[in-house]
């Protein structure tokens, strides 16, 4: 149904004459009459009776008038909403992120983001980085995926990448444990200690194990858990050394925290936010990536014990 025809019908019904309706709508009288005739043909109903120089609504036209007014009002509301959306400050943003960043970075970050975009609702999804998250991104179920850079192939062409500051591997232990110097511990020094680690589905855990192999030992894992605070609680009680990412909040625990190094170089994991190139991001999503990158850059120094 052509909204121009509907608007013509409502205008003629309100004014009562073709000539005055044509003046208001800035169309020629013959064109306006054709629009009315086309609408009557489409609906299969006669909408007006001619009484002298005036057009009077038929009973069918009267019953349709309020519906047509509602249709025009709804179309106007859709247009206004489209204008708001084009400004890029209203909408829903679905983001997949690791539990470490959700717990360590997003609580403060989302408060800053909401101050700038109060009408954008961010919905977080806790999905392990890798195939499942990328599949959800391709299906359009989420807009952005926070992941480690090495989770995607170097020649991957489907996704746009927005880099984040790298996340470091840290060792947390009881304050009295003599471990490391100058805030760091060489990974080989951990060979003789019981270790508290995340489960193997976490990319940083797999990369830590790979670094252990390079250092020539197999880690002695006494606990594997998806709950990072379980690792910290056990380390605080002296049951081992927890291997944690630098994004994790540790202020509630009395532990020593050291950077894990290999041959003197800190072990770290480059991060990125991915989006699907086939779906243009709204303006507020692009700003989300930029603000998150800045927030992560400031939030990833070695946390205080």
Image: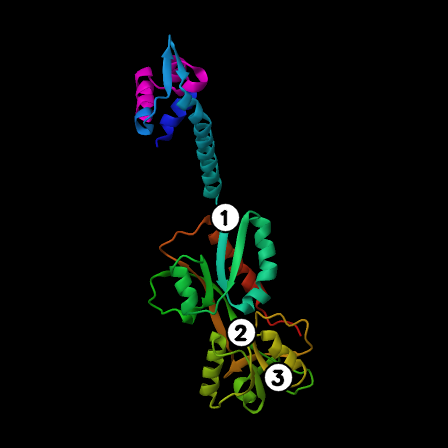
Q: Local crowd at mark 1 within 10 Å, few (<14), some, or many (≥20)?
A: some
- Where is residue 267 drawn, in percent x and y? 50, 77
Tell me where residue 68 appears, x and y as whole percent: 43, 28
Instruction: State the residue at coordinates (57%, 69%).
Output: 247
Instruction: Choose top left, top right, bottom left or bottom right for residue 156.
Output: bottom left
Asked whether the beta carbons under mark 2 and mark 3 sit within 8 Å of each other, the answer is no
Mark 2 surroundings within 10 Å by alpha-carbon count, few (fewer than 14), some (14 through 19), many (20 or more): many
**In this picture, is 185 found above or below 67?**
below
Residue 204 or residue 96, whichever sits in front: 96
- Is residue 98 visible to the viewer in this orientation of the structure? yes
Nearer-the-camera pick, 268 or 102: 102
Residue 130 drawn above or below residue 37: below
Residue range highlighted in magenta: 12-39
- Residue identifier under label 3: 181
Q: Is residue 129 magenta?
A: no
Q: From the viewer's perspective, is the residue at label 1 or at label 3 nearer?
A: 1
Tell me the CA gap for discs 1 and 3. Answer: 49 Å
Task: Tell me how far mark 1 sits from mark 2, CA to CA.
Answer: 33 Å
Q: Is residue 251 left or right of residue 45?
A: right
How would you classify the magenta stretch by its main secondary structure? helix
Decide: is 181 above or below 279. Answer: below
Question: How would you rate the neighbour count of disc 3 (Cα within 10 Å): few for under 14, some for 14-19, many for 20 or more?
Answer: few
Q: In this rendering, would 109 be left or right of 211?
A: right
What secondary structure is marked by label 1?
Answer: strand
From the image, tell me which residue sits under label 1. 91
**Residue picked out by circle 2:** 168
Residue 183 placement (x, y as % from top left): 61, 79
Q: How many marks?
A: 3
Task: Give the percent coordinates (x, y) of residue 21.
Answer: 40, 17
């Amino acid at each position: 149904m052509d909204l121009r025809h509907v608007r013509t019908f409502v205008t003629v019904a309100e004014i009562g004459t073709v000539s005055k309706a044509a003046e208001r709508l800035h169309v020629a009288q013959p064109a306006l009459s054709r629009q009315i005739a086309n609408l009557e043909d489409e609906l299969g109903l006669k909408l007006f009776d001619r009484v002298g120089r005036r057009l009077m609504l038929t009973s069918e036209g009267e019953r349709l008038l309020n519906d047509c007014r509602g249709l025009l009002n709804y179309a106007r509301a859709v247009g206004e909403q489209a204008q708001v959306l084009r400004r890029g400050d209203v909408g829903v943003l679905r983001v997949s992120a690791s539990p470490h960043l959700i717990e360590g970075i997003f609580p403060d970050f989302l408060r800053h983001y909401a101050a700038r975009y109060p009408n954008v609702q961010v919905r977080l999804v806790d999905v392990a980085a890798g195939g499942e998250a990328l599949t959800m991104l391709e299906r359009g179920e989420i807009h952005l995926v926070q992941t480690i850079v090495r989770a995607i192939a170097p020649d991957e062409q489907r996704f746009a990448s927005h880099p984040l500051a790298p996340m470091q591997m840290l060792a947390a232990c009881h304050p009295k444990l003599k471990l490391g110097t100058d805030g760091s511990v060489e990974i080989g020094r951990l060979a003789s200690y019981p270790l508290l680690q995340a489960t193997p589905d976490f990319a940083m855990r797999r990369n830590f194990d790979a670094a252990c192999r390079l250092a020539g030992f197999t880690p002695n894992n006494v606990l594997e858990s998806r709950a990072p605070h379980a690792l910290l609680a056990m380390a605080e009680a002296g049951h081992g050394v927890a291997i944690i990412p630098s994004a994790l909040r540790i202020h509630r625990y009395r532990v020593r925290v050291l950077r894990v190094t290999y041959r003197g170089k800190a072990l770290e994991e480059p991060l990125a936010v991915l989006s699907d190139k086939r779906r243009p991001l709204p303006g507020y999503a692009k700003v989300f990536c930029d603000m998150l990158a800045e927030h992560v850059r400031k939030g990833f120094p070695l946390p205080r014990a």
